[in-house]
Image: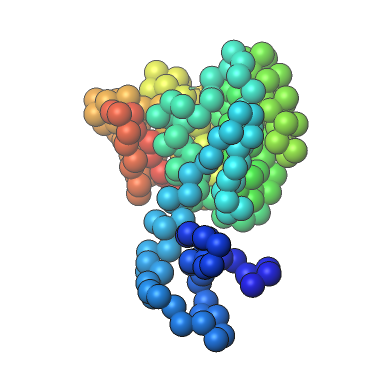
Amino acid sequence: MRGLPVEILSRDSESITFACYNPLEGLEPLKVEEIPQDWTNWKHSFGPVEVEDLVILPPWKKVIFIKPGLAFGTGLHPSTKLALRLMVETLKEGESLLDVGTGSGILAIAGKILGAGMVVGIDVDPKAVEEAKENAKANGVFVEFCVGEAKEVKDSFDVVVANLETEIFKRVLADILEKAERVCLLSGIYGEGELKEIEAMISSFNLSADRILTEENWYALRVVK
Ligand SMILES: C[S@@+](CC[C@H](N)C(=O)[O-])C[C@H]1O[C@@H](n2cnc3c(N)ncnc32)[C@H](O)[C@@H]1O
């Protein structure tokens, strides 16, 4: 049985009971169970196992390292999680990505890890840009991080993600939408009132959200151009 993927269920001095995925020649199984059809959900049950500073993960998980610092973006806030979820659903292999309000760099770094091509992250806070650069290095990915606002960025991008605030969107939404060639992901919208305000702003550009996610009264929208 050397080299076969089996899980030992019990053993004593005379016998071993084990589970395996394929029938073994010459052995009659005690019990046969079908692997669940919903393979994806089955995969979800393999969470991280932590032992001291070691974290054990199955190989299909994608890991992001974020050093605790002053910049926003540890991954705990619902607005960050919603933006990440929309990115996982939306971003295609090789697409370029602009992250407006990058903070710790978490969304830009996630973009790279998800297979994006060129990724740029911008923030008005120079300290955040410094921390984002350190985080990209810790993840072994290259992202161009700069201090500034969307209107200062020359290029346009397949995907633009922005986790900001409704008050800030009122000022910079036009610039953000202009930089997006295919899709724009907007997060940091709190409550139904703000959601309606953002939807009205988007419709003034003859656009609309084709996907809205929510968690703990925070909202994130996907606007396809
Ligand atoms: C809510 S944090 C988001 C951080 C990270 N992207 C995340 O999703 O967790 C918003 C960030 O946007 C930055 N910011 C605020 N106004 C901005 C603007 N007009 N242009 C670019 N960045 C801005 C802030 O400094 C802050 O780091």
Q: How is the image coloured?
A: rainbow
Q: Which x, y percent locates residue 188?
A: 41, 27
Which residue: 59% across, 33% down?
51
Image height check: is 71 above or below 20? above
Camera-nearest residue between 38 and 50? 50
- As drawn, the residue found furthest toward the front would be 13
Residue 6 visible: yes
- Residue 221 lies in what quarter of the image? top left
Q: Is residue 117 left or right of residue 224?
A: right
Which residue: 61% across, 28% down?
52
Q: Is residue 31 left or right of residue 123?
A: left
Total numbered labels: 0
Q: Is residue 105 left or right of residue 204?
A: right
- Residue 24 lies in what quarter of the image? bottom right
- As drawn, the residue found furthest toward the left would be 192
Image height check: is 221 above or below 66? below
Residue 105 visible: no
Image height check: is 67 above or below 57? above
Q: Which x, y percent locates residue 205?
A: 39, 39
Image quadrant holding the N terminus, namely bottom right
Image height check: is 220 above or below 122? below
Which residue: 52% across, 68% down?
15
Q: Which x, y percent locates residue 112?
A: 65, 43
Which residue: 60% across, 19% down?
68
Camera-nearest residue between 24 and 46? 24
Q: Which x, y percent locates residue 93?
A: 62, 56
Camera-nearest residue between 107 and 135? 135
